[in-house]
Image: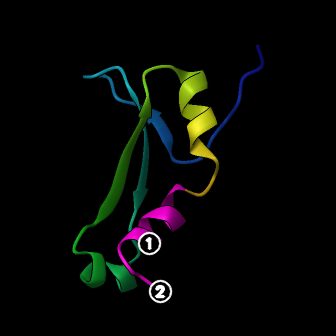
Amino acid sequence: MRNVTVKYLRKNDRTGSFEYRRRVTKSLEKLVTKREFLKVLGKTQSEAVMRYGGRMFSVYCRRHSVQ
């Protein structure tokens, strides 16, 4: 299996799950009322990479009507 580097993906040491973690830009902070976006993508690295898809932040913005 090859090593894959995925931006904004990290393993949570406490839970052992893989998370997509990204800071919300200053201009969006007031609209989404958060400083960072966090989504659990899975328990294994391969599961998380498959779910990542490179579009997690844009999905978050669409769900919260941020333009």
Residue 17: quarter of image: top left
Q: Which residue is mark 2?
A: 67
Q: Quadrant of the N terminus?
A: top right
Asked if residue 50 is positioned above or below residue 23 in the image, the reply reads above
Residue ID at (29%, 83%) = 31
Residue 26 falls left or right of residue 47? left
Asked if residue 30 is positioned above or below residue 12 in the image, the reply reads below
Asked if residue 53 is positioned above or below residue 46 in the image, the reply reads below
Q: Amino acid at mark 2?
A: Gln
Residue ID at (50%, 19%) = 44
Structural crowding at the residue carrying mark 2, measured as other residues with C-alpha within 10 Å and reported as few (<14), some (14–19) or many (≥20): few
Q: Amino acid at mark 1?
A: Cys
Q: Which residues are magenta?
A: 56-67
Whether the residues at callouts 1 and 2 have beta carbons within 8 Å, the answer is yes
Question: Is label 2 in a helix, a strand or a loop?
Answer: loop
Q: Which residue is mark 1?
A: 61
Residue 18 falls left or right of residue 47? left
Residue ID at (25%, 83%) = 30
- Mark nearer the N terminus (1 vs 2): 1
14 and 44: which one is in front? 44
